[in-house]
């Protein structure tokens, strides 16, 4: 009886080993392990961008500086403002109104460093710039307006 029991247990063990190796081999071919352990991705990103506003920044006071700004709005309600202005370092802000008829300051953006300012917000573009017209102003360290663009 003991010998018969040992043979049955051995056969069952071999069958289990064969089945497990077949499952592992099949899974490796159809589902890479990275897919099974990949951490969750942040929901907002370029694929979730729902709106982009492009603003041309023109020289102001004969400064000689030109650039662009984009306001990207994402489906999760967040937004990002990217300002590119030659190779300039200074301050950037969004005002209500236009370059020729400036209103109140709405939002201060991250400073330009070597021509780049990137500011992320957890709020929509309307909350940042307002629902009416707005202007993006670039200032020198001394407070002189160097470039302006409006929408």
Image (tube, rainbow, N blue to C red):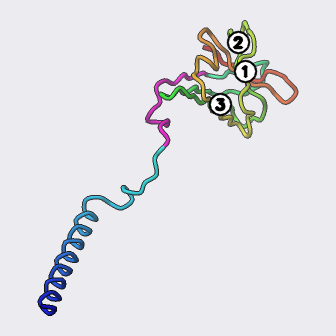
Mark 2 touching mark 1, by CB under 8 A?
A: yes
Closest to the observer: 7 or 151? 7
Magenta residues span: 42-55
- Judging from the image, what secondary structure is the residue with disc 3 in? strand
Residue 117: percent from the left, percent from the top?
Answer: 68, 34
Height in image: 112 above or below 145?
below
Q: Which quarter of the figure has residue 127?
A: top right
Q: Is residue 87 magenta?
A: no
Residue 57: percent from the left, percent from the top?
Answer: 66, 23
For residue 83, the mark is 3
Mark 3 and mark 1: Cα distance apart in space? 10 Å
Height in image: 97 above or below 14?
above
- Judging from the image, what secondary structure is the residue with disc 2 in? loop
For residue 47, the mark is none
Mark 2 and mark 1: Cα distance apart in space? 8 Å
Of the two numbered discs 2 and 1 on the same chain, state the one appearing first in sequence: 2
Mark 2 and mark 3: Cα distance apart in space? 16 Å
Of the two numbered discs 2 and 3 on the same chain, state the one appearing first in sequence: 3
Question: Which residue is rendered at x = 47% and y = 45% of the image?
Answer: 41
């Amino acid at each position: 009886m003991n010998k018969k029991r040992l043979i049955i247990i051995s056969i069952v063990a071999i069958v289990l080993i064969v089945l497990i190796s077949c499952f592992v081999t099949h899974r490796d071919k159809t589902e890479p392990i990275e897919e099974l352990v990949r951490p969750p991705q942040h929901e907002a990103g370029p694929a979730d961008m729902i709106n982009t506003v492009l603003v041309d920044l023109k020289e102001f006071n004969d400064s000689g500086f030109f650039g662009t700004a984009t306001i990207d709005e994402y489906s999760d309600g967040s937004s990002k403002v990217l300002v590119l202005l030659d190779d300039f370092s200074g301050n950037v802000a969004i005002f209500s109104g236009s370059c020729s008829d400036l209103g109140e300051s709405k939002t201060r953006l991250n400073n330009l460093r070597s021509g780049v300012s990137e500011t992320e917000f957890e709020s929509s573009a309307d909350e940042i710039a307002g629902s009416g017209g707005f202007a993006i102003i670039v200032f020198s360290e001394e407070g002189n307006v160097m470039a302006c663009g409006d929408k």
